[in-house]
Amino acid sequence: MFVSASWALCTKFLQNVITSYEWWSKSLHGIDTNGSGINFNGLIKGATSFPQVILTAVAFNRTLWHWIESAIVVEAKAMYHTRFIPIWMLN
């Protein structure tokens, strides 16, 4: 009973302290239309799509990884005009 009451109190506390985080879009293979944060209309018609992450990783080519990262960042900044929009990667 004590554990149950403690868990309920802890859960209530965490709900008030930790707010939910909205994940807008993913960038694992480049900028994707997954989520409400991205739309390809207007000036930007699309974005670069990179191969599966496992294929890129087994290349053991840090320069390639940096180029992919740089391309994703440039496209994200172009889409959002450098304002802060969270973009996440699954892996």
Image (tube, grey):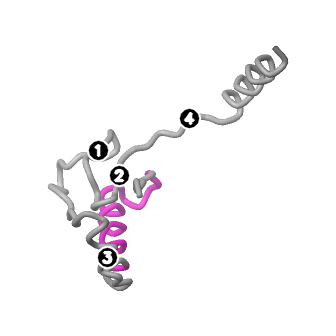
Judged from the image, the secondary structure of the residue bearing numbered disc 1 is: loop
Q: Select label 2 or label 3 by which is in front.
A: 3
Mark 4 or mark 2: whose residue is earlier in sequence:
4
Closer to us: 89 or 74: 89
Q: Which residues are magenta?
A: 66-85
Measured in 3D between alpha carbons, the distance from the residue under mark 4 to the one under mark 3, in whole angstroms, is: 35 Å
Q: Is 4 left or right of 42, judged from the image as shown?
A: right
Q: Which residue is mark 2?
A: 26
Where is residue 76 drawn, in percent x and y?
34, 61
Mark 1 or mark 3: whose residue is earlier in sequence:
1
Residue 34 is marked as: 1
Tell me which corner region of the image, top left, top right, bottom left or bottom right, holds residue 47. bottom left
Residue 11 is marked as: none
Q: Which residue is mark 3?
A: 58
Mark 2 or mark 3: whose residue is earlier in sequence:
2
Judged from the image, the secondary structure of the residue bearing numbered disc 2 is: strand
